[in-house]
Amino acid sequence: CDRAGVLTDSYALVKAGRMSPESLMMLLASYKNEDSYIVWQGLSDVLGGLDTVMSDDEKMSANFKKFAKVFLLHLMESVGWEKTDSDGHLTTLLRGMMIGLLSTFCHDDPAVVAEARARFQAFLEDANDVESLPSDMRTPVFKIILKNGGEEEYSQVLAYFDTATDNAERKHVLGSLGSATDPSLKIRTMEWSTSGAIKLQDFFYPMGSVGRSSREGREISWQYFKDNFDKISAMVGKGSSSLMDACIVSCVGSFCSTEKADDIEAFFAEHPLPRSARKISQTTENIRTNAKFLDMLKASDLESDSFWESL
């Protein structure tokens, strides 16, 4: 689809310094009424990429989330949460994508929270009720509930890990627990990931749910990795190097500063992991690229409230 190509190409040009960030945001603003799944695939990638980078700048991040929220709430009005008889395959896919994005950009919207709570309550009453909470909605709904809840909601989501009938269902828990806003619950999630309660091939998923949850979350996940390096190394042992690679990316992959890239490199210089050297290098290179991109955004009008108000 041409509209998707224009957007993703423009995003690449901005990252390369060949198009202004202001032009990209004005282009993005023209997609507010978009309802094509193909175009939303591109929109989702761009919104997600910008969200990760801007999360290191509190003011810009707040303005961007407010901007993105308008897109998602408009799409929610158009597509809705409930499937209909007239839905085509792409509409079903779009709805699943939309709810995932709602958990990132609209988790504080009263209508979104109310809908998520109603569906979560039905799930608590009957976890097999896939009409109220279909499988493709579970991870984002869990995230919305956790972002608006506390100890009780955390325990409710965690409890499903032990009662879920298959690993696909358990992954909804693994991928969402770190969304709890309380730092102590994020730390508890990290501790749970290395407790032995999770299969070795899956232990990095909850780490990623913490590391990708917020600016604070990635600080917690990286600190936990450093503090528990020997334990994690022993867990992975002589298993596939891809496990340690996934663990490293889950804990540090969302950083966007050269200082953190330096810190990561210094740590692994003292604690070498030869089999993961390439992944560590790729990860720190990506962090430096994102840091450079953030500096570019900070030097633009995106630092100004008035720019966002003009969109």
Image (cartoon, rainbow, N blue to C red):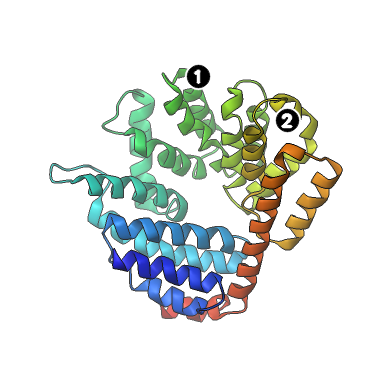
SS for dot 1: helix
Using the image, tell me which numbered label, if any, was put on residue 162: 1
What is the distance, in whole Å, between disc 1 and disc 2 at their CAs? 23 Å
Quarter of the image containing the N terminus? bottom left
Q: Position of residue 209 (x, y in %)?
A: 56, 41
Q: Residues within 10 Å of mark 1 (few under 14, many from 20)?
A: few
Q: Is residue 198 left or right of residue 22?
A: right
Q: Can residue 231 be seen in this view?
A: yes
Q: In this view, does 36 lie above or below 168?
A: below
Quarter of the image containing the C terminus? bottom left
Give the image quarter of residue 183.
Answer: top right
Q: Is residue 6 above or below residue 262?
A: below
Q: Is residue 146 left or right of residue 264?
A: left
Looking at the rendered structure, the number of numbered marks drawn on it comes to: 2
Of the pair 144 and 95, the residue shown nearer to us: 95
1 and 2 marks in contact (CB < 8 Å): no
SS for dot 2: helix
Residue reaching furthest to the right: 270
Using the image, tell me which numbered label, if any, was put on residue 104: none
Q: Is residue 198 above or below residue 54?
A: above
